[in-house]
Image (tube, helix red, strand yellow):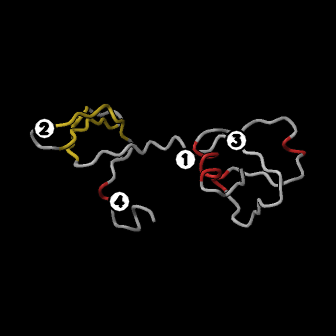
Amino acid sequence: MTPCDADLRHLLVLNTTFLGSRWSEQTHSHIVTLQRVGGKPFDVEAEFLISATGPLSTPTLPKIPGLDAFEGTAFHCYKWDQATKFEGNRVGVVGNGSSGVQMVVRGRVPT
């Protein structure tokens, strides 16, 4: 589901830099300081503050010599082929970030 599907697009603030936030005890809300491109900083008040900067939305694939010649199945979990069967195979998980953790902790990859 996207913001457009949920009719939330009018609530989005795009092309804007997050400059900081502070908690207001008086209003029990976050005061968030933003700045649009070429504009002056401005504050908005929010009940919730969610960091959604997207650093994990673009996967970083490792540069492994010889990977292009590998004859087995290889993929990043962001493009997880649900048909892949791990049982009975030797499985290697490269990386220790959220991608590898998603696969191993959920029990998808036998340990």
Q: Residue at x 30, y 58 (%)?
A: 10
In which quadrant is the N terminus drawn? bottom left
Q: Nearer the viewer, residue 10 or 74?
A: 74
Question: Residue under circle 3?
Answer: 61
Residue 25: mark in rendering: 2
- Identify residue type, mark 2: Glu
Q: Nearer the viewer, mark 2 or mark 4?
A: 2
The numbered mark, 4 or 3, whose residue comes first in the sequence reads 4
- Identify residue type, mark 1: Ser
Where is residue 21, by image quadrant? top left
Question: Residue under circle 4?
Answer: 9
Kindly state the secondary structure of the residue where label 1 is placed: loop
> Between marks 1 and 3, how big is the CA–CA gap?
12 Å
The numbered mark, 2 or 3, whose residue comes first in the sequence reads 2
Kindly state the secondary structure of the residue where label 4 is placed: helix
Horizontal arrangement in the rendering, residue 66 relative to residue 39 (left or right)? right
Count residues near mark 4 (Cα–Cα under 10 Å), then give few for <14, some for 14-19, many for 20+.
Answer: few
Q: Residue at x 30, y 45 (%)?
A: 49
Residue 28: percent from left, percent from top: 15, 43
Where is residue 36, by image quadrant? top left
Residue 87: percent from left, percent from top: 78, 61
The numbered mark, 1 or 4, whose residue comes first in the sequence reads 4
Kindly state the secondary structure of the residue where label 3 is placed: loop
Question: Residue under circle 1?
Answer: 57
Count residues near mark 1 (Cα–Cα under 10 Å), then give few for <14, some for 14-19, many for 20+.
Answer: few
The numbered mark, 2 or 1, whose residue comes first in the sequence reads 2
- Identify residue type, mark 3: Leu
Q: Nearer the viewer, residue 93 or 13?
A: 93
> Between marks 4 and 3, how big is the CA–CA gap?
32 Å
